[in-house]
Amino acid sequence: MAETGAKSLRVDLITREYPPEVYGGAGVHLEYLTRDLRHLADVRVHCFGAPRDEPGVTAYPEPVELKGANAALRTMGVDLEMAAGAEGTDLVHSHTWYANFAGYTAKLLYGVPHVVTTHSLEPLRPWKAEQLGGGYALSSFCERVAIENADAVIAVSGGMRRDVLAAYPSVDPDKVQVVYNGIDTELYHPDRGTDVVERLGIDLSRPSVVFVGRITRQKGLPYLLRACRLLPPQAQIVLLAGAPDTPEIAAEVEALADELRAVRDERGVVWVQEMLPKHEVIQVLTHATVFVCPSIYEPMGIVNLEAMACETAVVATATGGIPEVVNDGVTGLLVPIEQIPDGTGTPVDPDRFVADLADGITTLIEDPGRAEAMGLAGRKRAVDKFSWSRIAEETMTVYRSVL
């Protein structure tokens, strides 16, 4: 076994997402964690998808023998191949249920420690049953067996840590450590250019309300679309939203967007459904008056940090780890939410949540000076508290604790 502090320590990171195939926060996390961990250890990455050119990164396609099988079963097939690929490692570190089964299998196969980072939890996402059908039971199994048998669990926020211990009460609390997600503030910084926003049809003469995220239940986009009906008429709604989880959520959002267009002027709603390159998103965020995160489930929410790093004020739901990122009244406004305790995150009073969301957004639209000050404070907070080099060091500390 390598010395715990030595550069020769081999760490195998196991993940579904890795650049360029990134669609959510976990993929962003892996991109930057890998970069900074490489200064501290011998890092190998195992991911899903097409072959990668990056040294030390191995990608695994779905087994052809499982073509047409349930999506969760196909995932488990990839996991078994990734576990085989981790032979020779000193420690495996898996991210999300998609890769947890690979990490757990490698732990058993090679007798090495398994660290799990929890970016979300299956028991708190019951709507996934809409997407996976019976595969939801398999995804839940993969997550549960990995977390309950992990040598250490990294939670991306204090709220996430509380959720882990509530969802999996057999887990020793001492094994669950908080290591925040981070932000690359050299990449994410204000871009005052206008070529992207002009190409997308965003009117720079109007205050803009921006949402960035996948169309999934947890992101709360339907609540935002309802709230936008209540905003001042000069506000322009900019949605960078695509990749719907299911046809049902896609249809719901499309209908709400049509209703919103009907009550606002012709250019009052700009909806971009394709995934934009980072540099284009950064320019849109920079020119936003306010960024909105209406999530009903969010273990941390890297997207809030991305907006803050671009000097944009944030209005976000006070749920999960968001209050640990957004400093209420300083870098943005938190919207209170009382949620039904059934794991869905559904507001007890949806109309109240929608109205409070609208009130928070309106407050900053009508006070652009305050929004600007919050944006400056947000940038400072992102730089001071959420650097990836710091997070890599904290992750190494967790590794050393289990070796």
Image (tube, rainbow, N blue to C red):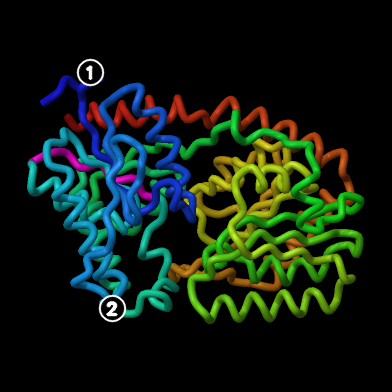
Residue bounds of the magenta highlight: 111-118
Residue identified by numbered label 2: 68
Q: Residue at x 82, y 49 (%)?
A: 364
Q: Quadrant of residue 323?
A: top right
Q: Residue at x 29, y 79 (%)?
A: 134
Magenta stretch encompasses residue 183: no
Q: Three-letter amino acid code at disc 1?
A: Ala
Magenta stretch encompasses residue 112: yes
Badge 2 vs badge 1, beta-carbon distance below 8 Å: no
Q: Can residue 245 be seen in the rendering of this structure?
A: yes
Q: Quadrant of residue 357?
A: bottom right
Left-right relation of 100 to 333: left
Q: Position of residue 383 (x, y in %)?
A: 60, 27
Q: Residue at x 19, y 36 (%)?
A: 91
Q: Position of residue 63 (x, y in %)?
A: 22, 65
Q: Say which mark, if any, is on residue 6.
A: 1
Please count the marks in the image: 2
194 in relation to 120, above or below: above
Q: Can residue 173 be seen in the rendering of this structure?
A: no
Q: Position of residue 385 (x, y in %)?
A: 55, 29
